[in-house]
Image (spheres, rainbow, N blue to C red):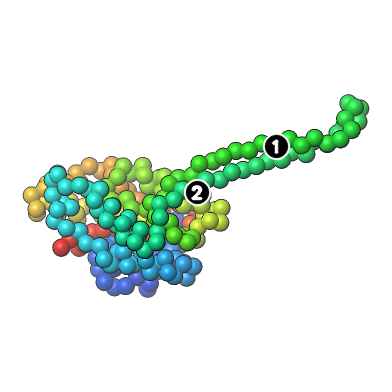
């Protein structure tokens, strides 16, 4: 799948300077057109977010970055959510007179499928924050977006993650050479191949990656 670049025309220049963006299916344009208020929330959260030096130092709580972003969404009315589906099937079994059957019988069955949990949901958009988690979380996120979009529940989704090499290089200048040394955590380089092979299906997906340019 070829990635699109409608975010260049939709996302403010100040954010394009600080974050690395990627998208599928012209997601930025779709999200703005279908859910303008929620899309503005995403831009506002990105605009207000900055990395601090403490986020880069040993012993710092790396999950604090995700917590700050999630809190910013909560303050704008977004909530963590999980969409479960219940499928009920009814089979009307018609009678066969040679067997002495005079009336149809009704056979019912029900299957409950528990959905994936999404970090932030508002209206018909979903946003997950994947700062420094196991990269398998990306597969979970994309599978959830695909299923919810195909079910007609979401119009699109967004992931906030991070870059790898430039943040690691910046950490080295702070004397934290081993920070982000692992290659099995969520980052833009891990996400892009999943996007290009179409793992999110038809769901328009906008990705904003936190870079070293967000550090102040």
Q: What element carries label 2?
A: loop
Q: Is residue 65 left or right of residue 54?
A: right
| Label 2 to label 1: alpha-carbon separation | 23 Å
Which quarter of the rendered picture does the N terminus lie within? bottom left
Number of callouts in the render?
2
Residue 80 is at least partly visible in this image: yes
Labelled pair 2, 1 in contact (Cβ < 8 Å): no
Q: Mark 1 points at which residue?
A: 108
Q: Quadrant of residue 38?
A: bottom left
Give the vertical position of 127 relative to 84 (above or below). below
Q: Estimate the x, y position of residue 196 in percent, counting from the top left.
A: 41, 53
Residue 188 is at least partly visible in this image: no
Q: Estimate the x, y position of residue 83 in percent, counting from the top left.
A: 50, 49
Mark sitting earlier along the chain (2/1):
2
Give the vertical position of 12 relative to 180 (above or below). below
Q: Mark 2 points at which residue?
A: 83
């Amino acid at each position: 799948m070829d990635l699109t670049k409608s975010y260049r025309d939709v996302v403010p220049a100040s954010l394009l300077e600080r974050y690395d963006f990627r998208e599928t299916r012209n997601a930025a344009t779709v999200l703005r057109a279908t859910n303008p208020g929620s899309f503005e929330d995403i831009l506002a959260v990105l605009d207000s977010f900055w990395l601090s030096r403490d986020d880069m130092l040993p012993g710092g709580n790396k999950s604090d970055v995700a917590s700050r972003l999630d809190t910013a969404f909560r303050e704008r009315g977004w909530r963590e959510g999980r969409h479960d589906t219940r499928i009920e099937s009814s089979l009307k079994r018609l009678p066969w007179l040679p067997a002495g059957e005079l009336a149809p019988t009704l056979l019912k069955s029900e299957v409950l499928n528990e959905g994936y949990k999404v970090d932030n949901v508002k209206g018909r958009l979903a946003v997950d924050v994947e700062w420094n988690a196991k990269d398998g979380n990306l597969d979970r996120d994309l599978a959830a977006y695909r299923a919810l979009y195909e079910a007609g529940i979401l119009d699109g989704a967004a992931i906030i993650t991070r870059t790898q090499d430039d943040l690691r290089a910046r950490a080295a200048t702070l004397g934290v050479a081993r920070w982000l040394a692992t290659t099995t955590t969520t980052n833009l380089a891990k996400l892009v191949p999943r996007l290009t092979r179409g793992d999110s299906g038809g769901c328009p997906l906008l990705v904003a990656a936190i870079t070293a340019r967000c550090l102040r």
